[in-house]
């Protein structure tokens, strides 16, 4: 008995894949079962585009009461490492998804894949080719011209089997031979012009060691993995659309040979994530790290999931983002502000409020008793009164933002200037009486007097009508720490792209568009409650945005903070 089709949700953007699944279930294909997979190659760190794929594949399985497999396509030992396996597992779990018993590796199936390759040879559907890599490319033809048959294409079954066995035994050097499918060298789809199935690679594998010296190509291994695992809907990005005919050809021939039951898995392609102000190319990400344009793979400016986590982005924000942008067959650009808005929306709901002064200057209340302090109370979250209030110590000397005082105010300025009154949020109304300066004329402190009957929450406090409302931290109680203001890594929405006005022949690099202000480090003064913040604990710093205690550099009792996003999209101001 199948589970019911989930109802439409008007808050979720269109998802054509659900329509396909709904129709397959109506036809009772695979008995109505839905099984998906997320199949990363363990040769790098996951990025924002992978988050979309993870949320899509695991989300579809959850919506239909099915399962999503986590499978590592570890078919290229020269570029793979256990470090990446561990990082990918951690990232998927951080996004909030579990796979239960369904954790797999392509290398689990190497023996089965080898047997299937032998079957194709015996069926006349595969052969060992001894052309060099350059010769294979030349023989393949072009998009407008057909390819040519390799001179080795008509080797006998017996010779092909012998050569393939000797390849496995390690008798040949890398590149001496490959195993190719025998399909059609004149096919208009260049991917069907006898694609390579196996290549020789004498490299140590992080799981199988030195047991193998031939490894299947991803395009050969991936369909087989899907079929072995009984995947129903193999969801992948649009660049694999041209590979679908080979996917179908391979599984059809192996099903005919009795390896898999029908129906075999169905490949469905969707548009990959194209996000402004970032680069998602693995090559470019490696260049940014290797050339030290960023501080490592977990740099909060880098669009990796380890970087996003360290910056304070949330799994809930990524899932909200995936739902909002929907799933399409057409490539389209998504503005980075959409992702930032999704993070902002979730953090507005989830993050408790705290006070931080990022550019501090001292405020001295001259008529407040020296050595005295008292308690003010601030709500932990205005949307969740059940979270209660916290104490904020108030004293004669406070830290305020430097921009909250102007000796000569501009029109419309409502904060502190000589003779003006403003409210210290959660505290008293104060009247500015002047300022102190050093020998060079730099302002070192702001002077004011407080109104003793104006304390917030007490009778008579509302008698004072002022426009300015300032945040503050007691000097005697403040927690001083490093705060990092992160911004977009690139200053142009399409890094490296030519733009109007460029000189003829000018070549741009994406590195030319790195934002020089993508990181500012400050020594800030924070309310004392923030001293106890735990790594990855998130807060809204009033006026300044959403911040997270750095998961790497924070210590017990000594957190440092990273800005996740501002309170609004500052790039649109």
Image: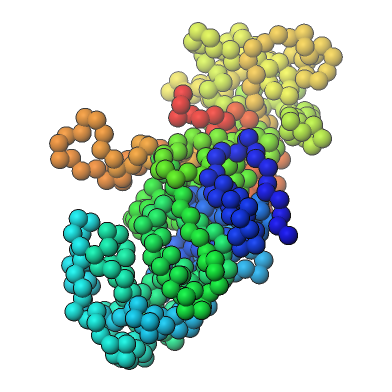
Q: In the depicted view, which residue is nearer to us: 63 or 24?
A: 24
Residue, far left? 504
In which quarter of the view is residue 91 placed?
Answer: bottom right
Residue in the picture at 46% in, 70% down: 251
Residue 393 drawn at (x, y percent): 74, 32
Q: State the colouring used for the structure image.
A: rainbow
Left or right, residue 175 beside residue 82: left
Does residue 266 sit above or below 104 in this rendering? above
- Where in the figure is residue 339, as x and y percent of width and height? 52, 39
User: Does 568 appear above or below 163?
Assistant: above
Residue 58 at x, y = what percent? 60, 55
* Rendered image quadrant of residue 233: bottom right
- Name, please, the residue furthest toward the front: 27
Residue 11 image point, x, y percent = 62, 35
Q: Which residue is drawn at 50% across and 60% down?
A: 266
The relative height of residue 163 versus residue 355 in the rendered view (above or below) is below
Name above or below for residue 173 compared with residue 224: below
Tally of marks: 0
Tell me if residue 317 can be seen. Answer: no
* Residue 334 can be seen, yes or no: yes
Residue lying at 32% horizontally and 91% vertically, measured from the top left:
158
Q: Nearer the viewer, residue 49 or 68?
A: 68
Q: Which of 285 and 133 is in front in this view?
A: 133
Q: In which quarter of the image is residue 375?
A: top right
Question: Quick one: quadrant of the N terminus?
Answer: bottom right
For the point 18% across and 72% down, which residue is it? Answer: 135
């Amino acid at each position: 008995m199948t589970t019911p089709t989930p109802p439409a949700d008007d808050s979720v953007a269109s998802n054509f894949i659900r329509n396909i699944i709904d129709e397959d279930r109506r036809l009772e294909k695979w008995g109505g079962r839905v099984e998906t997979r997320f199949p990363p190659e363990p040769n790098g760190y996951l990025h924002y585009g992978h988050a979309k794929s993870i949320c899509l594949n695991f989300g579809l399985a959850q919506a239909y009461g099915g399962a999503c497999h986590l499978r590592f396509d570890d078919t290229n030992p020269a570029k793979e490492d256990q470090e990446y396996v561990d990082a990918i597992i951690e990232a998927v779990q951080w996004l909030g998804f579990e796979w239960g018993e369904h954790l797999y590796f392509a290398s689990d199936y190497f023996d089965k894949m080898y047997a299937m390759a032998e079957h194709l040879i015996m069926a006349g559907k595969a052969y060992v080719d001894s052309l060099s890599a350059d010769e294979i490319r030349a023989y393949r033809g072009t998009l407008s011209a057909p390819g040519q048959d390799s001179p080795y294409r008509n080797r006998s079954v017996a010779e092909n089997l012998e050569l393939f066995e000797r390849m496995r035994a390690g008798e040949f050097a890398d590149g001496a031979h490959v195993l190719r499918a025998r399909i059609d060298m004149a096919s208009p789809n260049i991917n069907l012009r006898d694609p390579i199935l196996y290549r020789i690679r004498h490299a140590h594998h992080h799981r199988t060691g030195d047991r193998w010296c031939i490894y299947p190509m991803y395009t050969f291994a991936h369909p087989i993995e899907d079929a072995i695992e009984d995947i129903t809907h193999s969801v992948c990005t649009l660049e694999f659309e041209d590979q679908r005919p080979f996917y179908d050809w391979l599984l059809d021939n192996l099903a005919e040979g009795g390896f898999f039951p029908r129906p075999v898995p169905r490949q469905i392609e969707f548009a990959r994530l194209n996000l402004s102000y970032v680069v998602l190319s693995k090559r470019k990400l490696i260049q940014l790290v290797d050339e030290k344009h960023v501080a490592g793979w977990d740099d909060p400016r880098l669009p990796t999931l380890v970087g996003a986590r360290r910056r304070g982005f949330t799994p809930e924000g990524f899932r909200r983002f995936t739902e909002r942008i929907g799933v399409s067959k057409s490539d389209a650009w998504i503005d980075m502000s959409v992702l930032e808005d999704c993070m902002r929306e979730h953090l507005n709901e989830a993050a408790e409020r705290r006070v931080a002064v990022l550019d501090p200057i001292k405020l001295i209340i001259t008529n407040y008793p020296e050595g005295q302090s008292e308690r003010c109370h601030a709500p932990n979250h205005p949307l969740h009164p059940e979270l209660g209030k916290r104490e904020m110590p108030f004293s004669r000397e406070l830290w305020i933002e430097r921009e909250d005082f102007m000796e000569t105010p501009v029109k419309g300025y409502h904060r502190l200037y000589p003779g003006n009154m403003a409210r210290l949020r959660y505290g008293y109304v104060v009247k500015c009486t002047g300022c102190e300066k050093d020998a060079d004329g730099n302002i070192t402190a702001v002077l004011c007097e407080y109104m003793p009957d104006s304390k917030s929450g007490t009778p008579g406090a509302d008698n004072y009508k002022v426009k300015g409302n300032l945040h503050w931290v007691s000097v005697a109680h403040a927690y001083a720490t490093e705060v990092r203001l992160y911004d977009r890594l690139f200053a142009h929405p399409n890094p490296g792209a030519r733009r109007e006005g460029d000189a003829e022949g000018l070549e741009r690099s994406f590195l030319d568009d790195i934002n020089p202000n993508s990181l500012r480090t400050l020594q800030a003064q924070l309310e004392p409650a923030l001293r106890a913040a735990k790594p990855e604990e998130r807060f809204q710093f009033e006026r300044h945005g959403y911040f997270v205690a750095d998961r790497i550099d924070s210590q017990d009792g000594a957190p440092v903070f990273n800005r996740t996003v501002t309170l609004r999209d500052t790039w649109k101001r």
